[in-house]
Amino acid sequence: MKILIADDEPDIRDILKILLTKEGFEVIETCDGKEALVEIHSKNPDLILLDYSMPKMNGRDLCTLIKKDLLLRHLPVILLTGKGDIDDKVGGLQAGADDYIVKPFEPKELIARIKMVIRRMQLDLEANPLTRLPGNISIMTELKNRVDKGRPYAVCYFDLDKFKSYNDKYGFEHGDIVIKQTARIIIKAIEENGNPDDFIGHIGGDDFVAVTTTDKMDAVCQAAINEFEKTAPSFYNDEDRANNFIMARDRQGIIQKIPLISISIGVVTNEYHQITHVAQIAEIGAELKCAAKKLERSNYIVDKRHE
């Protein structure tokens, strides 16, 4: 991972290079804002350490340019400010800096802050842009960790029923509202009925996943279903809500009465048979979701098949 340093003080650059190299980072050194901007475009660093006060272009102005550039705005920026320079700190944060360090800095704190910002950046880049929940990379990592540890777990796959028909009639903007509200419902179900270290991810579209333990899975699923059934009518206009259906095309293109949106959950566990690979979880989860969709309204199915 590459870190670009922009500071006009050679001694500071030397100290930073020694610290960062020791931690395994590749270091790019620059002595002013303009040189830093050229190197950012040519060297593609993963993080930027900017001194607030530099010749040619100061740290705040460079940070502003970075955060306005659609191709660069994801780059995390840490500003180095002088002790007690409150205006510098505020100005840097207003320019979009992700964090700041006060000089003279404590080496351990500097490294800790850099690693924290990198972790946050990696999560942000991978998160679903609509819900900000972890995306597929984080989901795969979480599932692999659960499989490797071998302790009892339950992977709950959530999917909305009749969502395409709803989108066709009400439009994608309303569809996004439904997706975000579904995320809130799942989060609430986990917070109130799950464990502190449970996981929630957004696979994409109207597909979500939550990872909990086998002793909590029923309560989590039932809470999510109850809340969704209570909330679903609010997604519709008065007429459709009163009718309890909409007139829309089904997946074959035929116009017919389509029930209100419901939620189906397929729950994969390692309670009854051994799971050795993440792909098994996804395969079983898809099968269970299909089975749950065949039931009336919102429902969930737990895989209780033995080896």
Image: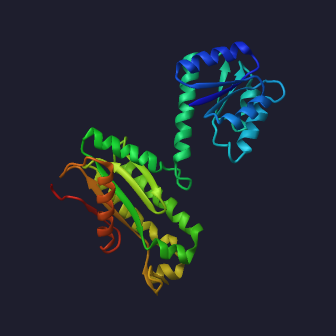
Residue 82, position in %: x, y?
A: 73, 19
Comparing 241 with 89, the one in front is: 89
Residue drawn at (57%, 28%), measured in percent from left and top? 114
Q: Going 25% across and 46% down the picture, which residue do you hit?
A: 276
- Which percent across, then down, holds residue 1? 56, 31
Residue 243 visible at all: yes
Q: How is the image coloured?
A: rainbow
Residue that protrudes farthest toward the bottom in the picture? 255
Q: Position of residue 26 (x, y in %)?
A: 59, 25
Task: Tell me which residue sits at (44%, 79%) in the image.
Answer: 251
Residue ranking furthest to the front: 42
The x, y position of residue 22, in whole percent, is 53, 18
Q: Quadrant of the C terminus?
A: bottom left
**Residue lying at 57% horizontally and 20% vertically, measured from the top left:** 21
Q: Quadrant of residue 3?
A: top right
Examine the rendered structure and indicate whether residue 229 appears above or below residue 74. Answer: below
**In the foreground, 275 or 228:** 275
In the displayed structure, 39 sits above or below 303; it is above
Residue furthest right in the image: 56
Direction left: furthest residue: 307
Can you tell which quarter of the image residue 81 is in? top right
| Side of 303 where 166 appears, left or right | right
* Foreground of the two, 135 or 227: 135
On screen, residue 193 above or below 293? above
Answer yes or no: is residue 91 visible.
Answer: no
Q: How many numbered marks, from 0 up?
A: 0
Residue 253 sits above or below residue 226 on the image: below
